[in-house]
Image: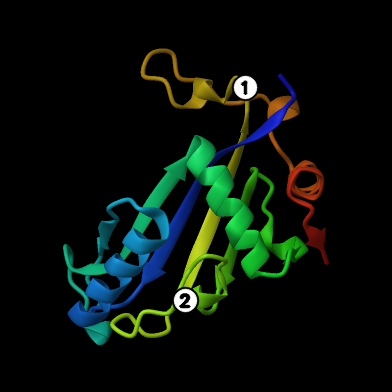
Amino acid sequence: MQEIRTEKVTLNIGVGKSPDKMDKAIKLLATLTGRTPIKTVTNKRIPSWGLRPGLPIGCKVTLRKEAADAMLKRLIEAVDGKLKTGQFDNEGNISFGIKEYISIPGAKYDPEIGLMGLQACVTLERRGFRLKKRKLREKKIPKKHRIDRQAAINFMKEKYGVVVE
């Protein structure tokens, strides 16, 4: 029950309100993952930025199971196997950015897309985490069963050979 595993890897690109950048971002995520990304939309109105509810400002794709592990290995190679302590939180999540997608192994430069970066968010879990997601009798995860920062760092060091600075 204490074994940590990768629940999901979410790739996210924020583009603002530019529709041509949105098309490029969707194409990039589709070529990297082989899945269709979804658009993320605004919920609030911010007049100074020209945002209104329902306006698409980014796109994301979520990978689970074997696809998540394979993509995570490629993403870690893109950052040279180094992560910072501040990129880990106390709930079992890791978040880091990649400045240019061409640094990901297996990704080739596409002149239609240009150079673009993305953000990767990794969610870790243990067996029994279904308690917080089920419909009936939803419960909180006990403190002793949660994944803290040090446990997540140790998992990444052991499984993926990451150097944490």
Whether residue 31 can be seen here: yes
Look at the numbered disc 1 and give the secondary structure of its residue: loop
Q: In the displayed orientation, state which residue is furthest to the top.
A: 137
- Decide which of 42, 160 is in the foreground and name it: 160
User: Height in image: 66 above or below 54?
Assistant: above
Could one spot residue 95 in this view of the protein? no
Quadrant containing the N terminus is top right
Identify which residue is drawn at 35% across, 53% down: 34
Q: Tell me if 15 is positioned left or right of 56 in this view.
A: right
As displayed, is residue 27 above or below residue 146? below
Quadrant containing the C terminus in the rendered view: bottom right
- The residue that label 1 is drawn on is 127
Q: How many angstroms separate mark 1 from mark 2 (CA)? A: 33 Å
Between 42 and 125, the one nearer to me in the picture:
125
Tell whether label 2 touches label 1 (CB within 8 Å).
Answer: no
**SS state under label 2:** loop
What x and y, as percent, mark residue 46? 25, 76
Name the mark on residue 144.
none
Q: Residue at x 42, y 20 (%)?
A: 134
Quadrant housing residue 48? bottom left
Q: Which residue is mark 2?
A: 117
Q: Amino acid at mark 2?
A: Gly
| Residue 101 placement (x, y as % from top left) | 49, 74
Quadrant of res 31: bottom left
Q: Amino acid at mark 1?
A: Arg
Residue 98 image position (x, y, % from top left): 55, 72
Q: Judge from the rendering whether residue 19 lies leftward or rightward of residue 65; answer left or right.
A: left
